[in-house]
Amino acid sequence: MLKILINECIQEVSSFNPISSNLEQFQLNKNNMILEVHAQLITEVSGALNIFDKNDIDVIPGFSARAMSSGGLLPDKDFEFIAANILTSVEDSIGQVDGYYFALHGAMQSPSYEDPEGWLLEEVVKRVGCEMPIVISLDMHGILTEKMCQNIWAFSMLHTYPHVDFQENGERSAKLLLDLIKSKKRPCIIDVPIPALVRGDELITETGLLGTFYQKTDGLVQNNPAVLAAGLMIGNPFTDVLGLKSHVVAICEDKKNIAAIEKQCSAIAEEFWSKRNKLQATTISLADAFIRFKELGATVVFADAADATSSGASGDSNAILEGVLKFDPTIRTLLPILDDNAAANAHSAGVGSAISVHLGGSCDPQFSPTEIKVEVLLLTDGRIDNESHGGIYDAGPTALLKYEGLRIIVFSKPIHLFDRSIFISHKCNPKDFEIVVVKSPHTQFKFFSAWVKDTLIIDVPGATSANLKRLGHKKCERPIFPLDVISSFTPLTRCYQ
Ligand SMILES: [Zn+2]
């Protein structure tokens, strides 16, 4: 019976969030607890486990660190704790396993580790040698680096945005790993980097241009028996590290016919480059958004992409709150905001109390708190059913606050806000509101787009602004579009084996 060690290390950071993330924001599990936890979740690991189960593989669960939200840089000691646990499981497995699967995101960053995942994989190979098959799964927003490619046999990535194929991604990785264990042949990874950062509605794979590029890379796999996997990595524009860029990649069985595959990857990269202007976000000023809202006369999502906790922002921006207060606070508006002090005050005062709270800027000093007198409508312990992935979000103590037409949900710990989980758990039906503030650039169609009149990406400040030039990148390799003007692009292929 084949034996495979699995480990998980998943976090996405925004380098522009001034507040460090920390280990408390991770679900940490060891050994068999990993299997129990993932049996309840829709994740890469659960997808991989399905495949391993069907193939009678003896799975050895190592260590799992899974961030419940994104955030600022992870302190070195916290990353080193995760890495040490994973590497211990690797050391314990030497001589006992046939291959390694790592579920990674790819957009981590620590002060001393620009490429934590690449470093970790290099340390794994130092221990197990390069003859041992290693396959990883990545988010399409991961930063694909040379060090990662040099230390793995193959990888798969998410193909959907908003992401719905976590399990399929894990299944793809697991199948790749089983095939490679059987063939014992290390494939080559073809990588065509593109100096472009992309955002906006065209990234929605079901309806937008990015989806057509994944169709092209799927075509590479279907039409070339030697291509085991292919896809695009677009990086997380908010993880400001040297390796940040987009990529077209293909995993090839061997170097036979590689020139033809490289040519096809380069052609896809050139087309991606030619459409780079369309692959940018269309934002709207707050003032214009209120005009548009009045014109539409039905529920509108104000997407606070700049404060997207799932991309690494802090969740404490009050920019849109202040806008609503100034424009017309009687508009029925539903708005979440991270503020542990306000939540604690509401819990001390109790339901039905009138209290004064300061909202906004509890983490990110670029926001100044807004003082507002509110009524406490509801209090919870912040254990929120996660409608996207199953399981529970832990938002810490929360409160639903009322101010005229506004219903403000304050929560104490960052959680993903790309679905309706926080609204449902506070008995707020988004359909009862005129403006719903969603702290994410995009959401699954069924959650909001299926019924709202429009989704407006508001151009307000924040650590994950869709207006990338606002952010002030310092580390990523320049020039890069759209931060710089680049007159021409000639694809240069890299090949790792
Ligand atoms: Zn992603």
Image (cartoon, rainbow, N blue to C red):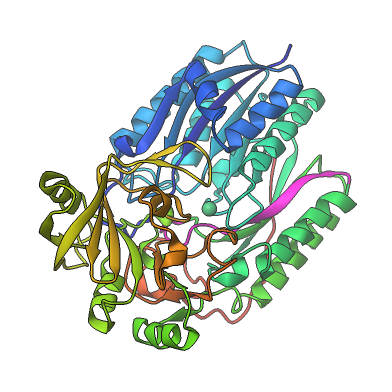
Residue 62, percent from left and from top:
51, 21
Above or below, comparing residue 85 to residue 485 in the picture: above
- Name the side, left or right, on which 99 lies relative to 70: right
Depicted 332 relative to depicted 494: above or below: below
The image position of residue 169, as x and y in percent, is 66, 42
Magenta stretch? Answer: 225-242
Q: Is residue 179 above or below residue 57?
A: below
> For this rendering, which residue is in front, 129 or 420?
420
Q: Does the magenta stretch include residue 231?
A: yes
Q: Quadrant of the N terminus?
A: top right
Of residues 73 and 260, the one nearer the viewer is: 73
Q: Which residue is drawn at 43% across and 66% down?
A: 432
Q: Quadrant of residue 474?
A: bottom left
Image quarter of the C terminus: top right
Q: Which residue is drawn at 53% across and 50% down?
A: 142
Q: Position of residue 193 (x, y in %)?
A: 62, 60
Q: Is residue 17 left or right of residue 109?
A: left
Residue at 39% x, 47% y is 425
